[in-house]
Image (cartoon, rainbow, N blue to C red):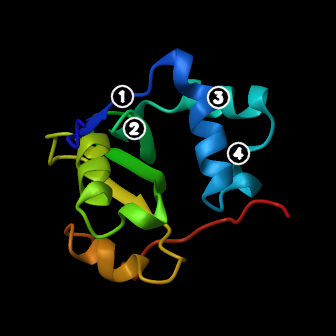
Amino acid sequence: MNNVLHVRDVLPSEVESVRLFLGQNGWAHRTGSAEHFAQLITNSQRTALAVKNSRIVGFARGITDGLSNGYLSMVVVCGQYRREGIGRALVEHVMAENTDITWVLRAGREGASDFFSSLGFETSTIAMERPRRK
């Protein structure tokens, strides 16, 4: 069996499979309908899909101008595959090689701060946010 991890952009034919994966991994509240999620993917300049043994095991997406600013929106790895470097590979794929971009994110889930710190993110004292309506 091919146990190699592949991280690549999401293909249009995979969008619904990604939405279902997110729903199975605690993110259904952020995906919405198939149409809503398809629009989220279309509007995201960067996506990353982790596939192992022909199975989706992780997903990430980012929004960026490609020159100066970026927002890392979702980073999700299936529980049984955590701590294998998949999250790191997803984030690195989304951020690419351009180190001139300042990437920001919201790290509210347990363990997220430690994970993102290991990727070079620092807690900011200057960031502000206007939360979405509930």
Residue at x 68%, y 51% (from the top left corner): 23
User: In the image, which is nearer the foreground, mark 2 or mark 4?
Assistant: 2
Disc 1 is placed on an element classified as loop
Please state, as top left, top right, bottom left or bottom right, where the C terminus lies in the image: bottom right
Q: Amino acid at mark 1?
A: Asp
Front position in the image: 71 or 112: 112
Place of residue 97 in the rendered image (x, y in percent of width and height, measured from the top left): 14, 40
State the CA–CA distance, disc 3 to disc 4.
10 Å
Task: Choose the circle earlier in sequence order: 2 or 1.
Answer: 1
State the CA–CA distance, disc 1 to disc 4.
18 Å
What residue did someone put label 4 on? 31
Q: Residues within 10 Å of mark 3 (few under 14, many from 20)?
A: some
- Residue 9 disc label: 1
The correct choice, above or below, for 121 with respect to 38 in the image is: below
- Residue 16 disc label: 3
Q: Amino acid at mark 3?
A: Glu
Task: Choose the circle earlier in sequence order: 2 or 4.
Answer: 4
